[in-house]
Image: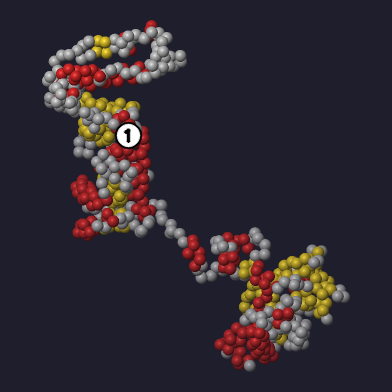
């Protein structure tokens, strides 16, 4: 038998059977028989070994390891714990009773009949004890697992080592801690049995004691570190963790429900060493309003080393390639260097056959970001946001219509190359690094401000005005001049001779300015237009000067306050001035709005000079009206 025990494979099989937890029911009986047979083989081998080596046992149990009571089934024996004053350690045969379990090298336990049983493990066991009619949870530490033993024992010696007192009386036993009774036992036959709750100890243990993974699953898959911390610091009650190891097994439910993006560095680990080594680019749009030129998008190109910015308003994304060709030819000529790589978000505008073929032919490396990861193209994405923020502020500041966003965008890019940024060395601008010069900002003016530019026309007459009112739109690209919007012509003008009134917006009333129409129809005479305009102005002046109080718009002004300009008189085309009869003071006056008659006399003139076949005033008066 000892030779069989020395055989390691045979020893492993025997120990596996001994340590196997018991099962309830009919299968459990067979499982018990196998475990007891294996334990007997192991004990026999150790007894022979002990006889040869004459070594003493580590633990002693004075209770004889005899036959079990036929009336106690395996399930009942699991709920019976005897209080033994002769046992030097707690011990049990039930593997399933352990909340924590640690296999150990088998060692012998001396029994009361001089026999020896083998202990193969140890751990903690939780019991639901009765004390004064109340149920409490008790934890037995370092309980030995002795599979060949038929009893479960609570050692008085082990309790005494922990400061507890056990008092035995005629029919009961009492366990006292700090002067209070914490547990009791009842004498059954010749043995004192610990009073336990009628509820299943195994189920109670299963509910309160579990592995870290099981508690993690019970607590809706919250982070395991927090669950472990709660158990260690007793944040909650009735929570014991059998194993603190998270294990190598990954919780698939957590991966499926909590998967998140990997962290992205806030700044690039490397920067380009030279100009044009890396170009960041991106297309933004579509914007909500088309520009004056019909653009809905804009594309940016940013040099990584200098952060020099170039922007192009475009009508569609397909224009991106042509803009790149313009950008490449310009910057390579200016710097004398070649573009080595560009970085984009991998949009379709950068993956066209002509774009890819051009980059392959010229040896330009195309760096693309991962799908739905704009952070990897952060330089271009951030620049798009900066430009949009600046454009919104510029348009709002001077009440400029949204259709001028492209001009504001180009102006913002022009300024952006001349201001400092955190991505560059201190007190350096893109202008410093790109052109190796100090930028001069003396020519900068407020976008959208009111201004006048000189009219440079060779056929100006002596009394013609020499300037036109305009709105500042930015700075000319290929000229040392300003880019302006002529308010009277409704077109772009470029001039270097400009007088600015930066404190005043050019368009104080956007609705009025945006609806200005220039009528070039020669059939309307200048004189008639001036008369109509003056009449309207007189009417507006009349409304503006209405007094507040007793003189309401429906009340006549006293005669002493009337003026010649407001007497309702008018002049016919023949030069005759007609003055209506004065209204008697205090008489009731019509509330109908009064207007100077500026059109009716035209019809009178037509009635006398227009032939029946001519229907328009323009045709009737063209070279035919002499006098009325």
- Residue 43, position as x, y percentages in the image: 67, 88
The residue at the point 49 percent across, 67 percent down is: 252
Q: Nearer the viewer, residue 199 or 604?
A: 604
Q: Nearer the viewer, residue 545 or 29?
A: 545
Residue projecting furthest to the top: 560
The residue at the point 46 percent across, 61 percent down is: 259
In the rendered view, tell whether residue 53 sits above or below residue 243.
below
> Could you classify mark 1 by the number of other residues whose Cα lies within 10 Å: few (under 14), some (14-19), or many (20 or more)?
many
- Residue 553, position as x, y percentages in the image: 41, 17
Count of numbered tags: 1
The residue at the point 38 percent across, 6 percent down is: 560
Per the image, label 1 sits on a secondary structure element best described as loop
Q: Is residue 613 left or right of residue 352?
A: left
Quadrant of the drawing holding the C terminus: top left
The residue at the point 39 percent across, 18 percent down is: 591
Q: Is residue 194 left or right of residue 300?
A: right
Q: Nearer the viewer, residue 168 or 501?
A: 501
In the rendered view, tell whether residue 445 sits above or below residue 380.
above
Residue 350 falls in which quadrant of the image? bottom left
Q: Is residue 596 left or right of residue 17?
A: left
Q: Is residue 99 left or right of residue 458?
A: right
Quadrant of the drawing holding the N terminus: bottom right
Q: Answer yes or no: is residue 136 visible.
A: yes
Q: Nearer the viewer, residue 167 or 380?
A: 380
Residue 385 falls in which quadrant of the image? top left
Instruction: Name the residue that disc number 1 marks.
Output: 400
- Residue 319, position as x, y percentages in the image: 24, 50
Q: How is the image coloured?
A: secondary structure
- Residue 491, position as x, y percentages in the image: 22, 33
Q: Answer yes or no: is residue 497 visible.
A: no
Residue projecting furthest to the right: 170
């Amino acid at each position: 038998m000892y030779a069989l025990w020395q055989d390691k494979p045979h020893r492993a099989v025997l120990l596996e059977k001994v340590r196997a937890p018991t099962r309830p029911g009919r299968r459990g009986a067979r499982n018990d028989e196998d475990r007891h047979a294996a334990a007997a083989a192991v004990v026999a081998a150790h007894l022979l070994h002990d006889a040869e080596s004459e070594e003493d046992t580590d633990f002693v149990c004075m209770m004889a390891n005899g036959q079990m009571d036929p009336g106690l089934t395996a399930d009942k024996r699991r709920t019976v714990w005897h209080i033994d004053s002769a046992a030097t350690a707690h011990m049990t045969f039930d593997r399933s009773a352990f909340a924590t379990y640690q296999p150990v090298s088998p060692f012998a336990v001396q029994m009361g009949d001089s026999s020896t049983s083998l202990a193969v493990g140890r751990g903690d066991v939780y019991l639901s004890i009765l004390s004064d009619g109340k149920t409490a949870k008790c934890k037995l530490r370092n309980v030995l697992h002795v599979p060949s033993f038929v009893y479960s024992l609570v050692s008085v010696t082990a309790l005494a080592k922990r400061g507890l007192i056990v008092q035995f009386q005629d029919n009961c036993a009492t366990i006292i801690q700090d002067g209070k009774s914490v547990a009791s036992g009842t004498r059954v036959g010749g043995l004192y049995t610990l009073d336990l709750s009628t509820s299943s100890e195994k189920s109670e243990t299963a509910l309160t004691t579990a592995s870290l993974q099981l508690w993690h699953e019970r607590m809706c898959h919250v982070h395991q570190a927090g669950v472990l911390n709660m158990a260690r610091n007793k944040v909650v009650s009735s929570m014991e963790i059998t194993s603190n190891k998270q294990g190598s097994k990954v919780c698939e439910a957590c991966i499926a429900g909590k998967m998140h993006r990997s962290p992205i560095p806030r700044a690039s680990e490397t920067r380009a060493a030279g100009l044009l080594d890396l170009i960041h680019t991106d297309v933004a749009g579509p914007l909500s309003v088309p520009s004056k030129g019909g653009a809905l998008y804009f594309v940016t190109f940013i040099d990584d080393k200098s952060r020099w910015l170039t922007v192009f308003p475009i009508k569609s994304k397909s224009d991106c390639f042509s803009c790149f060709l313009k950008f490449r030819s310009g910057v390579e000529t200016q710097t004398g260097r070649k573009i080595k790589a560009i970085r984009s978000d991998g949009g379709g505008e950068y993956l066209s056959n002509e774009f890819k073929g051009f980059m392959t032919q010229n040896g330009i490396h195309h760096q693309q970001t991962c799908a739905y990861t704009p952070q990897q193209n952060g330089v271009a994405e951030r620049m798009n946001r900066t430009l949009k923020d600046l454009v919104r502020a510029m348009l709002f500041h001077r009440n400029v219509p949204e259709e001028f966003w492209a001009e504001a965008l180009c102006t913002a890019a022009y300024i952006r190359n001349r201001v400092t940024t955190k991505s560059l060395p201190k007190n350096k601008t893109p202008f410093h690094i790109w052109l190796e010069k100090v930028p001069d900002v003396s020519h900068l003016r407020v976008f959208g401000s009111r201004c006048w530019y000189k009219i440079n026309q060779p056929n100006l007459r002596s009394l013609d005005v020499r300037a036109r009112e305009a709105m500042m739109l930015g700075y000319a690209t290929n000229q040392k001049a300003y880019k302006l919007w002529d308010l009277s012509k409704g077109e772009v003008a470029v001039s270097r001779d400009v007088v600015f009134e930066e404190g005043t917006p050019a368009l104080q009333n956007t609705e009025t300015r945006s609806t200005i129409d220039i009528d070039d129809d020669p059939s309307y005479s200048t004189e008639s237009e001036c008369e109509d305009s003056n009449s309207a102005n007189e009417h507006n002046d009349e409304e503006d000067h209405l007094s507040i109080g007793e003189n309401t718009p429906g009340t006549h002004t006293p005669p002493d306050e009337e003026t010649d300009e407001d007497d309702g008189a008018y002049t016919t085309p023949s030069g005759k001035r007609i003055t209506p009869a004065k209204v008697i003071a205090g008489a009731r006056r019509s509330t109908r709005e009064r207007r100077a008659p500026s059109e009716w006399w035209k019809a009178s003139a037509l009635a006398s000079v227009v032939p029946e076949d001519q229907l328009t005033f323009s045709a009737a008066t063209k070279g035919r009206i002499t006098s009325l």
